[in-house]
Image: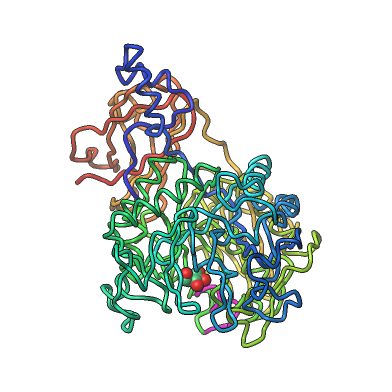
Amino acid sequence: MVQTPPVQSGIEATAVKAAAGFHTEAQSDKIDDLEFLFTRAIEFRQETIYFIIVDRFNDAQSSNNEGPNAALFDPTRQKWGKYWGGDLQGIIDKLDYLKHMGVTAIWISPLFEQVEDLMFEFAAMHGYWTKDFKRINPRFVGVDESTSLATCNVFNRLVKEMHARGMKLILDIVCNHSSPDVNGQKGKLYDDGVLIADFYNDTNNWYHHNGEVTDWEDRWQLENCEMAGLADFDESNIDFRNYIKSAIKKWLDLGVDALRVDTVKHMPLWFWQEFNSDLQTHKPSIFIFGEWGFSKPWDRGSVNFANKSGMSILDFGLCEAIRAALAKNSEGGFHLLQNIFDLDHLYDTASELITFIDNHDMPRFQSLNSDPDTLRMAVILIMTARGIPCIYYGTEQYLHNDTNGGNDPYNRPMMERWDTNTQIYKDLQLFSKLRRLNPAISLGSHVQKYIKPDIYSYLRRYRDSRCLVVMNKGQATTIDISNTELEDGEYTCIVTSRHFEIHNGKLRGLSLQQKESVVLSYVGDRVKGQTIVRAQLNGITTQYGEIVVVVGDCPELGNWDISKAYRLEYINANTWFGEIPFTESAGKAIAYKYAILSNNMSPRYENLVNRRWILVDRGTVKWRDNWAN
Ligand code: NOJ
């Protein structure tokens, strides 16, 4: 992720103004204009994301179904490539259903205006064949409504209703391409209704013209050739870059809180670095994650992207491992998952990866394995393991269609039931609350405690908060967990309400039914302070027994007295993290650096002139630092 600017959250700019040395009125006004510099406080790790394909979720307004071209709509819902009627009002009508289930953020499939023709039997119901990034798909809004963003009532209402419920809106965006050849037209692109580019008449060089990718290992091809015939933007064209950034900024201005970015693998890193930092300057609170198709921790490209682009990524590696271990019963079982977690240290922020068990590009989990209890284990797993969980729409209703193995497009059925009593619905309710309550789950380390192909136990740990999870996908059995790191005492499993005794840190004689999950949670004290800095330090290697501290020129950081420095938490072999409370120094300029303490040696300080920062007066901010050798 990018290094954040050394000033932050502007809930209260006044104290910062003084600290920054802006004294005259005129200068003072200036710093108000610089409000954008103050906030980089977005914390998405407590969210529970729900991914909706708009067309397939809920049809509230039948009048908009035919849109500009009735041939693209199938009222019988038999033709899987055509529109079936879902719209934004349909989402608004189901917000209470989602909120009640524990959903705190909704990823909405792309809303941009799409090409209005069929390619074979397929319309752009998915939203990935854009015609105009500044207009909204007419089928998603009221029939008489403007499709121009600024005046689109229903979108504004959606944002308002979501925010009123404390929910965040994640917009799916595409920067890599516009549309494929549909009826002899390709890449015809509009700027709020005005034609600005055309693949077949590309006088202003908006597109690459290098044919289809043939070698998926060739980075140049990935970035410069086409994928499935989609007109591929030439990012070296500044007009294109200005257009796409200005379009997305318009959506951000309307209240979009986060972005899911399509096909990030197909554009160069420098493009994303520029794009993300521009957007983050425009809206500092934005959280962004990208789709690096089939990323793996051992694929250097995807890890490098996650660490350097300024956005997080979808965790395809874990998704595949969960599907293999649980849905397909592959050899190795839970070891397949642990193999992924063992490489978490390669990422600067593994706890910000977006975790999922299926999506719109692969068969639904239940098309691989229809057993509801296996699905339940997979859901509990992503709700409690490291990362930010994302649930594909309908999972809670066991929605799946297994035609052709459940592959695209059969992984996109219409949502039909809204039962608030399904087991998965209730589990999501419970675990979403737990994620918010117990910081060990959202922020903490993920440590294996017991593993066999059929049994997996892991501990989430942060300060004195703990969450111990045990799962059994095999036959009923009894195990001992010798070092739970839980305080001795009695615990009640939040899934089964069974009681367990921890004695000398051990959990002995733990009987597990087939497909049973046990979750024991202990919530310790939360960090309180007027201003909280979430400090993350990467690129540091410590030996067992060593601890990392932050020391600085203010009382909260020990006034350079290393014995009073603030201690961080070990997350993994690359990451230390901590929430540092500031009250006395809130709103002031401070200096700090990191140091390593070990028992027998003198402290090892970072090798750099002190880091300097202006603390916001109140609120939460993040430091993302790299150890300076
Ligand atoms: C990835 C999306 O998830 C997929 O559904 C889409 O077809 C391609 N990117 C192209 O945009």
| Residue in the picture at 39% in, 37% down | 567
Find residue 8 and report its horizontal and vertical position in percent.
Answer: 39, 32
Nearer to us in this view, 135 or 512: 135
Q: Can residue 477 be found in the magenta stretch?
A: no
Q: For residue 304, what is the image quadrant?
A: bottom left
User: Tell me, what colour scheme is on the image?
Assistant: rainbow
User: Is residue 328 a member of the stretch shown in magenta?
Assistant: yes
Displayed quadrant of residue 88: bottom right
Residue in the picture at 48% in, 42% down: 42
State whether residue 231 appears in this view.
yes
Name the residue nearer the viewer: 392 or 66: 66
Q: Is residue 404 above or below residue 251?
A: below
**Residue 329 location in percent, x, y?**
58, 82
Q: Is residue 510 visible?
A: no
Q: Residue furthest bottom?
A: 404
Vertical relation: 175 (above or below) 36: below
Q: How many marks?
A: 0
Looking at the picture, does residue 121 appear above or below residue 194? below
- Residue at (66, 51) in percent of width and height: 145
Left or right for 473, reference 214: right
Q: Position of residue 619 (x, y in %)?
A: 49, 30
* Magenta stretch in the rendered image: 319-330
Tell which of 506 and 617 is nearer to you: 617
The residue at 39%/41% (across/down) is 568
Residue 235 coordinates in the image, percent (x, y): 30, 61
- Determine the main secondary structure of the stretch shown in magenta: helix
